[in-house]
Image: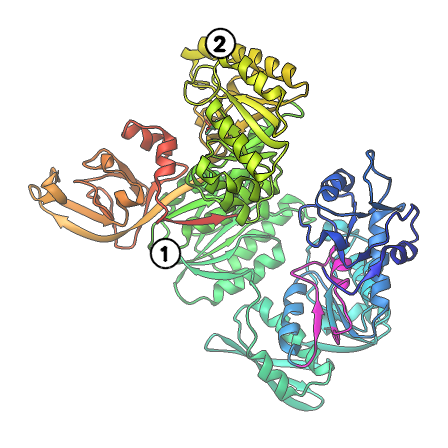
C-alpha cells in the first residue's frame, strides 16, 4: 500500500523502537507478507507472529531487496545494509504507525462495524458517494487488527473522505481499531451471531463493538438493535426502524415490484420513498443503512433514492444460478449460522421459479447452543419455511435426523458421500438453497449442480494440487527440497496458474523440458529457480536473459554451453549435471564421470548447483533390483563429482513413485511430477490420499434415435445392436480424445451412467451409445474423465499411461481453474 513517505528514522521515533539505523531510507510501503513484495526498496517489513512466525521470512524478504524491518529480535545471520527496528510487540508498532499516519490528516472519516454487512455497506457507500468525494477505504474486507492499519496507511492528502470497516472477534480489540480509524461518523450494521464464541455474552459483544463510536459526532444505527444501549452512545444518533415510529427514518412499508424492493418511510414529518434493486432481506437491510447514512449526511431524499436505485451488487454471498435439469441454485456455500440460514431461507421463499423448495445444509458450528437445542431450532425453521426436500450433511445432522419433519429427507456423513450419491437425489425443477459451513466445501456441491456452459473444458482444481503437494511433503524427511515438474504445460494442466500456486506454496525449484517453457514462466512472473531439462543450443541466449538453469548431460552440450558462456561473458553460471544410471536416455555414463570431473575442476564458467539421475522403473516392484543398482551407481557418481569440485551439491534422484517407494533415495531433493496432478500407481486410489486435479467435460450437441442396422459415423464402423439412441458430443481427436477410443473402446459418463463410444472418433466430435440413459437431453454435461471416471481407467482402455492422456488434452480446450 502506497502513500506519502516517511524516513526510517522518523518511523523509529514514531514507534519508539530500538536498534541502529545503518542506512537512511524512505518508506512508502508496509509489508506483512513476504509473498507479496512490491517496491522492495521503499518497503518496511513487519515480522508479525501469526500462524507462522514472521521472523522466519525475514531472509526471504531481504533476498527480495527489502532493507527495513520491524522485529522483536534481530536476525541470526548478518544482513548488510538492513535496518532492524526492535520493538516488544510488532503488531502494536504497526498499529501505532498507522494511528500516527491517520492523525496527520483532517479528512472526514466514517467507521463501520457490526456482525454482518460491513463490507457491503462500505462498498455501497463508496458507490453512492464517490461522485462527490475522493474516497479512501479498506481494500476488500481488510478489517482486522492487521487489515485496518494497512487500510489507513493508504490515506493521502488527496482524500476527502475515508470509509473504514472494523471487524473484531473478541474483547479488547475495538479500542485499538478506534485509535487507528478515529471515525467522526459511526455506522452499526446488522448484529447477528457471527463471532459469538469470542465473547461471554451478546451484551459484551455489542458493548465492545460500540467502542468504535467513542469519539464519534454522529452514529447511524437500527433503532431496534440498540434500544437497551442508548446510554452507551454519547454521540448524536440517526436511527432507522421498520417497527418504531420514533426512529428518524421510519420505514413503514415495503413492497416487491418486479425484483426490486419499494420502500416508503417517514422522515422529518414527510413521506419519502426509495427503490432498492435487490430481492433479499439482508440486502434490503444494508440498503436502508446506506439510505439512513446519506440522509444523515445531508443528501436530499430525492438524490438518495436516485443513487440507491442504481446500486450494483458487491459479490453477494447469496447468488442465484441456473442449475442442471431446470433447477435454480442459490449458492450460499461459505458460512452457516441460524440467522443467516433464516435470511437465506427467506430468499429461497421469494424465488418463484419452481414450486418445489430444497435445502442442502451442513452441520452448523460455533452456535453457542447445545446440539439438541440447535437442531430442534433448525428443524422448526425448516418446517416453518415449508421446505419440500431436505439434504443434511455432517455427523451432527445425521444423528438428529429424527427431528426433521419434511416430505423428503436425505442424510450424509460428509460432503464426499453426498457428491457420490448426488445423481440419485434426482434434482429436477426445484429451487435449491445450498448452505454450508466453510469446512464442508459446499462449493463442490454447487459446482456439480450448476449448469455449465456447453463448451469442452478442462477443470483444474488448485486446492487439490495443494493437497497433493502436501501429501508428498509429508513423506519427505526434514530439509528435503522439492523440485516440481511443470513441463509440457504442467502435464497439460496449465503454465502460469499451476506454477504460481507452487511458487506461492514454496516449492524450491521448478523444472521444464525446453527453454521456451521457462521463458513463458518468467514472463508470467515466476521468480523461483527454473531448471531446463533439455536445453536447445539455438535458444541458449535466452538462458541468461531469463535466468534459467540448464541441465548438462553430455560432453557435446557442455562444450556448447562453455562457448556460449564465454561469448556472453558469463562466469559461475548455475548448471545441473545429469548422470545416466540405467535409463539410457540422457546423461553422463559411469565411464565418462572421470573425464567430466577433469573438465569441471578447471572450469570458471559454470557453478554446479545439483547432480541427479532418473529412475527408469521406480514404481515397479519387479524392477526393484534394477532400481537398487541405479541408486548405487548414482551414489558412486555424485561422490566422485563432489570430491573433484570440492563443494557440496544438491543431490536428487526420485520422481513421484520414488518418493513413496524409495524413502532412502530422497537425498537433498525430489522431483515431483505426476503425483502433483493426482496420479501415482504406488498410492492406491482407495487410500484417498491423492485426487486428480483435472476433470475433462463436454456436452451433448444432439440426440438421435437410430434403428438397429444403420451405420454411424465415418467409415460406417458404428452400429447399435438394437434400436436405440445416440448422442453426438463436442469432443474429438483434435481435442485430445484419441481415435483409439472409438468403436466402443472408450466410455464417458452422462447423468451418472457410463456409456460407450460408437463408430469412429471424428476430429471435433464423437458419438456415444446412450440407449441406456433415461431422459437424456441436448445440452447435458458429459464427463470424459474426473475423480470418479479416472484417467487411469482411460489409459487402460487404449493401452497407454495416464501421462499421455493428460498431456494430450489440446490447447484448444479451455482450462478453468478453481481455487477457494
Ligand atoms: C518428468 C520427470 C520427472 C517427474 O516424473 P514423474 O514420474 O512424473 O514424477 C522427474 N525427473 C525427470 C528428469 C523428468 O523428466
Q: Position of residue 755 (x, y in %)?
A: 25, 39
Instruction: Say what secondary structure mark 2 lies in.
Output: helix
Query: Is residue 487 shown in magenta?
Result: no
Q: Is mark 1 within 8 Å of ligand 1?
A: no
| Residue 400 visible (yes or no) | no
Mark number displayed over residue 453: 1
Rendering quarter of residue 218? bottom right
Prevailing secondary structure of the magenta residues:
loop
- The structure residue drawn at horizontal position 37% and vertical position 34%, both measured from the top left corner, is 790
Q: Is residue 79 left or right of residue 796?
A: right
Boundaries of the magenta span: 132-161
Q: Residue furthest left?
A: 709
Instruction: Please name which of the two marks, 2 or 1, marks the residue nearer to the observer.
Output: 2
Asked if labels 1 and 2 touch by Cβ distance under 8 angstroms, the answer is no
Number of labels in the image equals 2
User: Dot 1, crowdedness within 10 Å: few (<14), some or many (≥20)?
Assistant: few
Q: Position of residue 48 (x, y in %)?
A: 78, 46
Mark number displayed over residue 140: none
Q: Which residue is mark 2?
A: 629
Picture layout, residue 598 above or below residue 307: above
Amino acid at each position: 500500500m502506497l502513500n506519502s513517505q516517511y524516513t526510517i528514522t522518523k518511523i523509529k521515533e514514531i514507534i519508539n523502537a530500538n536498534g541502529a539505523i545503518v542506512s537512511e531510507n524512505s518508506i512508502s510501503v508496509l509489508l506483512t507478507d513476504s509473498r507479496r513484495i512490491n517496491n522492495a526498496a521503499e518497503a518496511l517489513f513487519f515480522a508479525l507472529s501469526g500462524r507462522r512466525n514472521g521472523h522466519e521470512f525475514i531472509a526471504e524478504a531481504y533476498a527480495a531487496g527489502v532493507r527495513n524491518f520491524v522485529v522483536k529480535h534481530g536476525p541470526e545471520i548478518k544482513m548488510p545494509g538492513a535496518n532492524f527496528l526492535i520493538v516488544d510487540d510488532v503488531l502494536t508498532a504497526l498499529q501505532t504507525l498507522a494511528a500516527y499516519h491517520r492523525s496527520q490528516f483532517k479528512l472526514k472519516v466514517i467507521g463501520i462495524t457490526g456482525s454482518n454487512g460491513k463490507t457491503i455497506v462500505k462498498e455501497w457507500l463508496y458507490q453512492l458517494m464517490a461522485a462527490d468525494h475522493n474516497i479512501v477505504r479498506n481494500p476488500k474486507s481488510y478489517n482486522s487488527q492487521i487489515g485496518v492499519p494497512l487500510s489507513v496507511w493508504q490515506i493521502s492528502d488527496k482524500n476527502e473522505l475515508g470509509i473504514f470497516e472494523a471487524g473484531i472477534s473478541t474483547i479488547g480489540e475495538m479500542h485499538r481499531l478506534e485509535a487507528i480509524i478515529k471515525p467522526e461518523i459511526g455506522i452499526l450494521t446488522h448484529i447477528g451471531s457471527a463471532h459469538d464464541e469470542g465473547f461471554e455474552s451478546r451484551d459484551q459483544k455489542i458493548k465492545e463493538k460500540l467502542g468504535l463510536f467513542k469519539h464519534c459526532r454522529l452514529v447511524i444505527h437500527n433503532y431496534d438493535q440498540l434500544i437497551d444501549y442508548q446510554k452507551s452512545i454519547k454521540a448524536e444518533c440517526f436511527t432507522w426502524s421498520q417497527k418504531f415510529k420514533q426512529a428518524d427514518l421510519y420505514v413503514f412499508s415495503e413492497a416487491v415490484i418486479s425484483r426490486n424492493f419499494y420502500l416508503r418511510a417517514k422522515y422529518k414529518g414527510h413521506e419519502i420513498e426509495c427503490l432498492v434493486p435487490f430481492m433479499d432481506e439482508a440486502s434490503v437491510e444494508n440498503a436502508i443503512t446506506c439510505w439512513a447514512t446519506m440522509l444523515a449526511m445531508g443528501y436530499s431524499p430525492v438524490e438518495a433514492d436516485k443513487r440507491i436505485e442504481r446500486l450494483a451488487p458487491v459479490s453477494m454471498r447469496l447468488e442465484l444460478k441456473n442449475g442442471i435439469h431446470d433447477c435454480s441454485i442459490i449458492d450460499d456455500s461459505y458460512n452457516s449460522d441460524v440467522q443467516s440460514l433464516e435470511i437465506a431461507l427467506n430468499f429461497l421463499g421469494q424465488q418463484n421459479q419452481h414450486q418445489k423448495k430444497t435445502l442442502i445444509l451442513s452441520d452448523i458450528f460455533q452456535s453457542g447452543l447445545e446440539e439438541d437445542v440447535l437442531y430442534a431450532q433448525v428443524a422448526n425453521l425448516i418446517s416453518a419455511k415449508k421446505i419440500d426436500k431436505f439434504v443434511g450433511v455432517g455427523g451432527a445432522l445425521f444423528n438428529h435426523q429424527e427431528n426433521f419433519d419434511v416430505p423428503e429427507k436425505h442424510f450424509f456423513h460428509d460432503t464426499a458421500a453426498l457428491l457420490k450419491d448426488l445423481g440419485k437425489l434426482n434434482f429436477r425443477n426445484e429451487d435449491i438453497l445450498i448452505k454450508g459451513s466453510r469446512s464442508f466445501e459446499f462449493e463442490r456441491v454447487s459446482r456439480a449442480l450448476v449448469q455449465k456452459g456447453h463448451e469442452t473444458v478442462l477443470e483444474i482444481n488448485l486446492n487439490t494440487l495443494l493437497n497433493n503437494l502436501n501429501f508428498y511433503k509429508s513423506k519427505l524427511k526434514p530439509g528435503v527440497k522439492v523440485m516440481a515438474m511443470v513441463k509440457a504445460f504442467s502435464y497439460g494442466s496449465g503454465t502460469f496458474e499451476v506454477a504460481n500456486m507452487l511458487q506461492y506454496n514454496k516449492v524450491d525449484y521448478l523444472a521444464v523440458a525446453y527453454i521456451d517453457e521457462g521463458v513463458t514462466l518468467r514472463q508470467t512472473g515466476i521468480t523461483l529457480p527454473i531448471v531446463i531439462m533439455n536445453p536447445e543450443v539455438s535458444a541458449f541466449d535466452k538462458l541468461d536473459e531469463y535466468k534459467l538453469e540448464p541441465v548438462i548431460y553430455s560432453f557435446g552440450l557442455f562444450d556448447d554451453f562453455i562457448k556460449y558462456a564465454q561469448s556472453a561473458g558469463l562466469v559461475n553460471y548455475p548448471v545441473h549435471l545429469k548422470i545416466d544410471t540405467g535409463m539410457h536416455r540422457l546423461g553422463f555414463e559411469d565411464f565418462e564421470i572421470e573425464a567430466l570431473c577433469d573438465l569441471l575442476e578447471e572450469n570458471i564458467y559454470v557453478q554446479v548447483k545439483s547432480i541427479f539421475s532418473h529412475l527408469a522403473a521406480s514404481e515397479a516392484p519387479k524392477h526393484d533390483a534394477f532400481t537398487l543398482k541405479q541408486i548405487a551407481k548414482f551414489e558412486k557418481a555424485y561422490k566422485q563429482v563432489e570430491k573433484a569440485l570440492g563443494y557440496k551439491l544438491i543431490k536428487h534422484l526420485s520422481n513421484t513413485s520414488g518418493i513413496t517407494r524409495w524413502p532412502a533415495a530422497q537425498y537433498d531433493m525430489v522431483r515431483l511430477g505426476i503425483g502433483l496432478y493426482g496420479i501415482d500407481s504406488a498410492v492406491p486410489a482407495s487410500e484417498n490420499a491423492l485426487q486428480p486435479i483435472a476433470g475433462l467435460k463436454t456436452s451433448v450437441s444432439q440426440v438421435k434415435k437410430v434403428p438397429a442396422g444403420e451405420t454411424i459415423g465415418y467409415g460406417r464402423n458404428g452400429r447399435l445392436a438394437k434400436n436405440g439412441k445416440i448422442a453426438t458430443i463436442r469432443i474429438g481427436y483434435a481435442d485430445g480424445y484419441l481415435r483409439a477410443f472409438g468403436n466402443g473402446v472408450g466410455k464417458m459418463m452422462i447423468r451418472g451412467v457410463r456409456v460407450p463410444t460408437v463408430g469412429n472418433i471424428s476430429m471435433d466430435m464423437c458419438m456415444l451409445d446412450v440407449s441406456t440413459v433415461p431422459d437424456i437431453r441436448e445440452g447435458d454435461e458429459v464427463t470424459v474423465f474426473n475423480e470418479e471416471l479416472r484417467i487411469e481407467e482411460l489409459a487402460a482402455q487404449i493401452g497407454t499411461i495416464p501421462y499421455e492422456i493428460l498431456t494430450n488434452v489440446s490447447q484448444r480446450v479451455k482450462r478453468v481453474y478453481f481455487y477457494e
